[in-house]
Amino acid sequence: MSRLLPFCAGSQTWQGFIPEIWDELSKEMGFSYTIHPNPSMDFLTANASNWPYDAGIIDSSVPEVQSIRMADTWECTTAFLDSSAGAMVLKTTQVVGLFRLFDPFTGELWGAIVGTIFAAAFLLVLLNMLAPSQEFARLSLRQRLPSCESSLMSVYHMFAAALGGEDYEITWEGRLLRIAILFFVLIIASSYTANLAAFLNSSPFTVWGPRNIDELRDSRACFTTDQEEARFGAFVKSSVSAGPMMAMSFLEGKEFCHQALRNGQADVWIHPYESLKMYLMDNCGDLELVENIRILPNTWGFILKAEQRHLAANLSAALGHFKQQAAY
């Protein structure tokens, strides 16, 4: 693909949403057209008689256009696109470890569970000393003191109980303790199962950057041009831009912001929503649109000289019909 500046003279092949609209309108109204990139941004401020084109495209939501429309110098059609600036953020793939089965509970909770099991094992030993079974009742209190092996067996039996194992207790006190342990197991099992299902169904990606307007205010944004930085910069805490619009192609500006997200120079990329969406179609592996962030709405329409009011009215009617079609 050859380098294409935003404003350039000479023959080019144009494609995208705007040329497709012109194609549909030309079919319906029976006219032919050519596209001429305007060499400057101030054509509206010039005298309409010096403007050599029949129609142009303009964002009719900016104040300058409103004042010019009131001056009866230009005539605007109905809008063919209502848009706004959107936000793109970086997403990365989560690393799945070998011990992900422990993820549903935090480390502190796992520690509390293990601590509870050891405490229950201690209670089992204590019950054998203070409320022994008939077999142990014949022994003296000193003889009932647990050995290292019996202590380990108590811990083993509590872990077995936590996993739904054997029925070890033979005294009523031990059985009451086991019932308490079974309630404990019920809580653990149900909570773990619910959390595990949520973890297994969760997104494999981590999304970085702001998720709403409030978070956007504290973010560092990237803009593809310094003109966009001047227009949208008030919505963010700090910003970086690819440079002047005339110094690079649109693709170079987009690649600059994509790289800025990757290397941490920016938290979010602010750009016209439709353009972000088109770029996302080819770069969805590590980018995501933030649907909750839409700023500065704009309305695009065609603009004609005042003496072409009838053509503007016909274009508006054709646009109204076209916007009802599935192709739109």
Image (tube, rainbow, N blue to C red):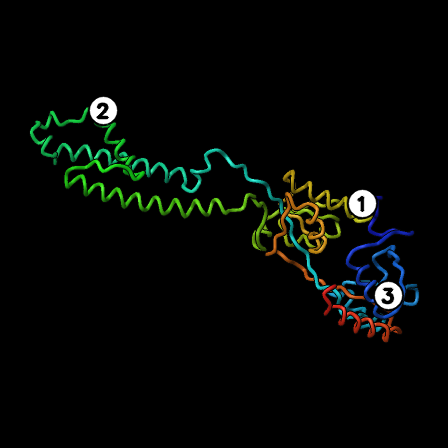
Secondary structure beneath label 3 = strand
Secondary structure beneath label 2 = helix
N-terminal of the two: label 1 or label 3?
Answer: 3
> Could you tell whether 152 is left or right of 227 in the image?
left
The vertical placement of 309 against 255, above or below, is below
Question: Looking at the picture, which amino acid does disc 1 mark?
Answer: Met
N-terminal of the two: label 3 or label 2?
Answer: 3
Discs 1/2, front: 2
Q: Position of residue 176 (x, y in %)?
A: 19, 43
Dot 2: within a 10 Å radius of its alpha carbon, few (fewer than 14), some, or many (20 or more) residues? few
Discs 1/3, front: 3
Question: Looking at the picture, which amino acid does disc 2 mark?
Answer: Glu
The vertical placement of 285 against 233, above or below, is above
Using the numbered discs, state the Cα–Cα distance from disc 1 to disc 3 in whole angstroms.
Answer: 27 Å
> Could you tell whether 198 is left or right of 239 in the image?
left
280 or 208, which is in the foreground?
Answer: 280
Residue drawn at point x = 29 percent, y = 35 percent: 160
Residue 110 placement: quadrant: top left
Residue at the spot of label 3 = 55
Dot 3: within a 10 Å radius of its alpha carbon, few (fewer than 14), some, or many (20 or more) residues? some
Residue at the spot of label 1 = 248
Q: Position of residue 182 (x, y in %)?
A: 27, 43
Discs 3/2, front: 2
106 or 183, which is in the foreground?
Answer: 183
> Which quadrant, please, contains the N terminus?
top right
Question: Looking at the picture, which amino acid does disc 3 mark?
Answer: Ala
Residue at the spot of label 2 = 149
Residue 274 placement: quadrant: bottom right
Tag 1 and tag 3, C-beta contact below 8 Å: no
N-terminal of the two: label 1 or label 2?
Answer: 2
